[in-house]
Image: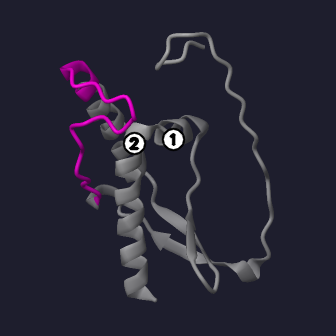
Amino acid sequence: KDSPTYGLKTMYSRTMYMGFVDSGYVGSTAPAPCGDFHPVVSKEPTTRFKCPTRSRSSMVAVVQTNATNILREIPDVMVCERSDHTTFYAWLYEEEFEALGSDDATPILKQWVQEISTAYALTV
């Protein structure tokens, strides 16, 4: 596959792990914002190679809109609480995982997690 940044043939490897948790560590589920999620979409690229051209900004907007649509389809998240932090988990298809892993999707993902975190803190 060609690297979108450098245009060279690249090969990416990914290590996947499967784990099991004792039910004592898994709390419950928390609702995700779904259709109530209306993030602020940035107009600037979030990668380190910022390009001021209109086409790049349009690509960022498309990536962020796609991320927003994916996140709006997630009904709830699993909550795992530890003494020092709370972690939220969501089930994703591989394509969704890859789309949300994009640097340009990061601001949208952060806003989504912040909304869940804030709402969850109010219920505890």
Magenta-span inclusion, residue 62 = no
- Residue 100 picture location, percent across and down: 47, 42
37 relative position to 96: left or right = left
- Mark 2 is surrounded, within 10 Å at the Cα level, by few (under 14), some (14 to 19) or many (20 or more) other residues, namely many
Query: On screen, 68 above or below 55?
Result: below
User: In the image, what residue type sits under mark 1?
Assistant: Gly
Give residue 44's quadrant in the image: top left
Residue 47: in magenta span: yes
Q: In the figure, is residue 34 to the left or right of 91?
A: left
Hey, what amino acid is under mark 2? Ala
Left of 1 or right of it: where is 15?
right
Q: Nearer the viewer, residue 80 or 3?
A: 3
Location of the N terminus by quadrant is top right
Which residue carries the number 2 mark?
Answer: 105
Who's the residue at 42% across and 72% down the image? 117
Predominant SS of the magenta segment: loop
Task: Tell me the residue at 52%/65% (across/down).
Answer: 77
Q: Are marks 1 and 2 in contact (CB under 8 Å)?
A: yes
Read off the magenta span: 37-57
Label 1: state its secondary structure.
Answer: loop
**In x, y percent, where is residue 36?**
27, 60
Identify the disc placed on residue 18: none
At 57% from the left and 10% from the top, the residue drawn is 8
Q: Is residue 3 above or below residue 27?
A: above
Residue 27's quadrant in the figure?
bottom right
Residue 60: percent from left, percent from top: 30, 32
Q: Which residue is mark 1?
A: 101
Q: Residue at x 60, y 83 (%)?
A: 84
